[in-house]
């Protein structure tokens, strides 16, 4: 028997639920309606069946209306029945013939739908055309073959454009593509079954291309709305909390709560400085526009001053009361104080009957899930040890990045929020006359703050800079880095998306992938040592004798030290809010090793001026650079020697220190060596156009720094391992619990466990002779790749571009030629060259790396 009209309408309603939940596409749903209702009933009843969508999900309603209008307009105007209509008619006959053998109506609809999906329209048919007002996600389903299915499993992201509803449901159901281990933590691992393809970011991120939209009709029986709480996950692509909210099938209310008191946490954290606040303001504005494009709206709430320690909880309770929401989804944060805040909020709201879910997204590996079991603690603090821990104790699989939705179900009414400007994130200071000081003008010009800007950055990097990244990422005069750190910090691109694109590049940069491991390592250290941003991990180094010269600190902050490379880097930081990793090492070494200023001062300045200011990363790097962290870097960046590696021709210095732009290449990094005539022609006047050097005796200050370290290590001998000479630090409570079991829960017992950590070899040697100078130390930690510090003086006098050295060098060559010719004419043998063969310094590729033989010894 044929199904009755009531049964047919019930079947259509059930199929509508399938398309609303994302398991069916709009055009496939319309084709099934034709099979179930028939041609005439579909024409008369279809629009009334989808009428509730006009208020709940206008985008989906317009798509279905457009498909209905297009189909029946074509059948009225054209007498010929095309191939698609014939296929639909045949499938209708097959369904009728098989109805008697089908046990229930649900299996009939399923079989009919599978036959309809297998129908492929001919090219040029009118059914393949989409009206201008329809959404780009309306398309006919391609034929489903075994080859296509195999390709989808092998390259899931490559096929997400054509069948997004299928690929996304497969991703959320965690099929075989989720079964691989974390690719980042196994350096050089080859994922053969899932080898990612070359980056297709531009294709994947096209507006509305191949995306799914989920929505439900708003009716008295509809579920209450869901609150989607955004923090540092301001993106649509690969956002687990966003995708999870769509799976619920309820209206979604995106919210952002600004509570600076809770962001700051205990101690002197400086979680959000002025530059990062400005970036956050711009990123929120761009993200709000992105949500508007998919039919949603981001609501801002200002929680400042409501109740210290509970402002976010009070705000969420008010929003829940206004909207009647019973679910809150968010992506987790890993700073210890923010995790404690989130745990308290989740516990309190669950007691109120509100379900809260936190999704892992901010790091590749949840730092609270990293364990040292099977690896031990030897080498802790290094990225190699961290990656070994992740390989030995694999967590949940990294998974495949998720595409962005095309629309969000919107509730019937929105809660009352505030304007973005009310949050005061980008507020500029005023002069006495009332005019604004727009200190962020250059930052605004230097960056694209949108999610699309992040994808354009990675696309450009993977097509150009990635091929030079392995060997030349430290160059300051060339853009060989990705500049993606601010986008990663504010979640405008996910680390998983970035990892997959990096693996899919033609040149797979392992060094670049290790940078993501360094990021995870920083958050792991922060979870182990919550006071990382303000207190030294190594107890003896808390007693180091630091300088209190505020004029030196101010000169370093303003780029007025008299050392061109340091000044150029600090001016770039102030004007753009960013500098590459190599230059951060240079300025940090100068502040700590040569100015003897505490690392906390550098950390605070970076947190205030960097647009990518990240508490975990900055604290770990400054602790290591300040000799107080879990790792000791075995190098010190000399302000002149480093310039010969990262800026050999002075291009970077000329850009940010234009007053030195007319100096020759070999002298631009040490203008104090220039003859007076060269300075006069270049327009350089020390103390007026360019500052004098704030310190001149760099070797003596390095020696003093080593003596200070030796003194504190000798004074606090209980924190030095007598056998190995390594520093000892108290073991974090979590690591003690992992190693000895949960029974050791007393912090007093835990503090008795001391852990040997990586210690610089020159510190171990200096302990034997504290009064020795740095140059006599056989493990002197200078910048690698240089013969001696006298190399640059040798080059300055012998380089052909130095006019004085050029004249002297040409005269010597002329005399040698005359002497050689005269000896040949007299029949005498040639004289041996006393200068020997030229030597090339290791790992140097510029013309300054050639050191004439005998020149170094002649200066001794």
Image (spheres, rainbow, N blue to C red):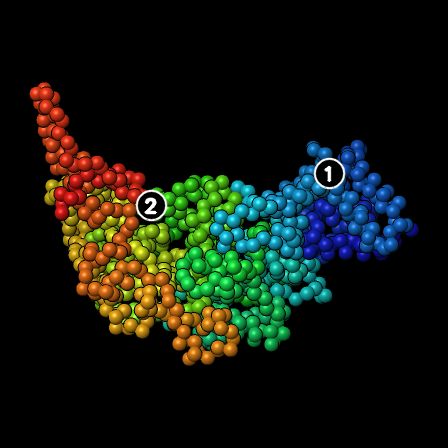
Q: Position of residue 68 (x, y in %)?
A: 73, 45
Mark in the foreground, 2 or 1: 2
Please tell me whether residue 331 is drawn above or below residue 673 in the rendered image: below
Q: Secondary structure at mark 2?
A: loop
- Residue that mark 1 sits on: 120
Regarding residue 104, the answer to whether it shows in the image is yes
Residue drawn at (71%, 50%) of the image = 24
Closest to the observer, 571 or 53? 571
Residue drawn at (48%, 51%) of the image = 187
Q: Position of residue 651 (x, y in %)?
A: 28, 42
Label 2 Cα crowd, 10 Å radius (few <14 / some 14-19 / many 20+) = many
Q: Position of residue 1 (x, y in %)?
A: 91, 51
Q: Secondary structure at mark 1?
A: loop
Residue drawn at (65%, 53%) of the image = 175
Residue drawn at (75%, 47%) of the image = 30
Closest to the observer, 514 or 451? 514
Regarding residue 679, the answer to whether it shows in the image is no
Q: Position of residue 739 (x, y in %)?
A: 48, 70
Q: Which mark is residue 475?
A: 2
């Amino acid at each position: 028997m044929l199904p009755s009209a009531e049964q047919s309408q019930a079947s259509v309603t059930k199929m509508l639920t399938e398309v609303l939940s994302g398991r069916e596409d709009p055009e496939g749903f319309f084709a099934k309606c034709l099979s179930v209702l028939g041609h005439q009933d579909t024409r008369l009843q279809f629009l009334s069946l989808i009428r509730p969508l006009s208020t709940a999900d206008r985008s989906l309603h317009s798509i279905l209306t457009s498909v209905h209008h297009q189909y029946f307009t074509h059948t009225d105007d054209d007498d010929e029945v095309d191939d698609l209509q014939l296929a639909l008619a045949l499938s209708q006959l097959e369904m009728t013939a098989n109805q008697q053998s089908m046990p229930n109506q649900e299996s009939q609809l399923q079989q009919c739908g599978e036959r309809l999906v297998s129908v492929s329209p001919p090219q040029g048919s009118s059914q393949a055309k989409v009206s201008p007002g329809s959404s780009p996600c309306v398309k006919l389903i391609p034929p489903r073959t075994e080859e296509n299915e195999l390709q989808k499993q092998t390259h899931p992201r490559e096929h997400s454009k054509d069948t997004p509803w299928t690929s996304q449901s497969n991703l959320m159901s965690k099929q075989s593509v989720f079964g691989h281990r974390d690719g980042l933590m196994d350096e050089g691992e080859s994922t053969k079954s899932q080898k990612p393809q070359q980056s297709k970011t531009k294709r994947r991120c096209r507006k509305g291309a191949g995306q799914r939209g989920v929505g439900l009709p708003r009716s008295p029986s509809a579920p209450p709305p869901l609150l989607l709480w955004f923090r540092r996950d301001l993106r649509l692509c690969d956002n687990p909390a966003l995708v999870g909210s769509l799976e619920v099938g309820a209206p979604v209310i995106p919210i952002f709560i600004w509570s600076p008191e809770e962001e700051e946490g205990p101690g002197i954290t400086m979680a959000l400085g002025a530059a990062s606040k400005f970036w956050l303001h711009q990123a929120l504005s761009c993200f709000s526009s992105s949500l508007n494009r998919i039919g949603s709206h981001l609501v801002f709430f200002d929680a400042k001053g409501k109740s210290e320690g509970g402002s976010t909880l009070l705000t969420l309770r008010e929003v829940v009361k206004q909207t009647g929401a019973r679910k809150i989804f968010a992506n987790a944060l890993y700073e210890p104080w923010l995790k404690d805040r989130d745990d308290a909020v989740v516990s309190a709201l669950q007691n109120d009957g509100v379900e809260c879910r936190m999704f892992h997204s901010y790091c590749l590996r949840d730092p609270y899930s990293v364990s040292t079991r099977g690896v031990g603690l030897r080498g802790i603090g290094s990225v190699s040890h961290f990656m070994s821990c992740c390989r030995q104790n694999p967590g949940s699989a990294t998974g495949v990045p998720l595409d962005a939705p095309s629309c969000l179900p919107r509730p019937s009414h929105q809660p009352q929020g505030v304007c973005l400007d009310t949050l005061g994130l980008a507020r500029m200071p005023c002069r006495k006359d009332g005019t604004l000081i727009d200190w962020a003008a250059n930052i605004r010009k230097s960056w694209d703050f949108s999610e699309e800007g992040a994808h354009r950055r990675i696309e450009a990097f993977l097509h150009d800079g990635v091929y030079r990244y392995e060997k030349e990422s430290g160059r300051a005069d060339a853009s060989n880095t990705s500049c993606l750190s601010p986008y990663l910090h504010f979640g405008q691109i996910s680390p998983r998306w970035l990892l997959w694109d990096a693996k899919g590049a033609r040149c797979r940069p392992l060094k670049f992938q290790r940078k993501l491991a360094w990021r995870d390592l920083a958050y792991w250290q922060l979870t182990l040592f919550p006071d990382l941003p303000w207190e030294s991990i190594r107890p003896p180094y808390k007693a180091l004798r630091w300088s209190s010269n505020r004029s030196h600190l101010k000169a370093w902050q303003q780029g007025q030290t008299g050392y061109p490379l340091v000044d150029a880097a600090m001016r770039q930081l102030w004007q753009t809010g960013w500098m590459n990793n190599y230059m951060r090492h240079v300025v940090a070494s100068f502040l700590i090793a040569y100015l003897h200023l505490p690392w906390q001062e550098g950390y605070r300045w970076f947190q205030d001026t960097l647009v990518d200011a990240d508490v975990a990363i900055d604290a770990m790097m400054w602790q290591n650079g300040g000799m107080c962290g879990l790792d000791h870097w075995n190098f010190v960046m000399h302000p002149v020697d480093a310039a010969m590696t990262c800026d050999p021709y002075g291009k970077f210095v000329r850009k940010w220190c234009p007053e030195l732009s007319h100096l020759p290449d070999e002298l631009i990094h040490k203008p104090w060596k220039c003859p007076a005539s060269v300075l006069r022609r270049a327009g350089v006047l020390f103390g007026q156009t360019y500052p004098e050097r704030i310190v001149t005796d760099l070797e003596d200050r390095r020696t003093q720094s080593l003596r200070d370290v030796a003194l504190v290590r000798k004074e606090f001998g209980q924190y030095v391992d007598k056998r190995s000479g390594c520093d000892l630090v108290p073991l974090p409570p979590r690591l003690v619990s992992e190693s000895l079991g949960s029974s050791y829960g007393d912090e007093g017992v835990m503090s008795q466990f001391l852990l040997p950590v990586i210690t610089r070899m020159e510190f171990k040697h200096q302990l034997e002779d504290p009064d020795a100078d740095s140059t006599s130390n056989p493990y002197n930690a200078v910048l690698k790749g240089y013969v001696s510090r006298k190399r640059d003086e040798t080059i300055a006098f012998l380089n052909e571009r130095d006019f004085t050295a050029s004249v002297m060098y040409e005269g010597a060559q002329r005399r040698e030629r005359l002497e050689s010719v005269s000896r040949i004419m007299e029949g005498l043998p040639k004289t041996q060259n006393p200068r020997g063969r030229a030597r090339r310094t290791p790992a140097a590729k510029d013309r300054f790396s050639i050191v004439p033989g005998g020149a170094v010894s002649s200066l001794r």
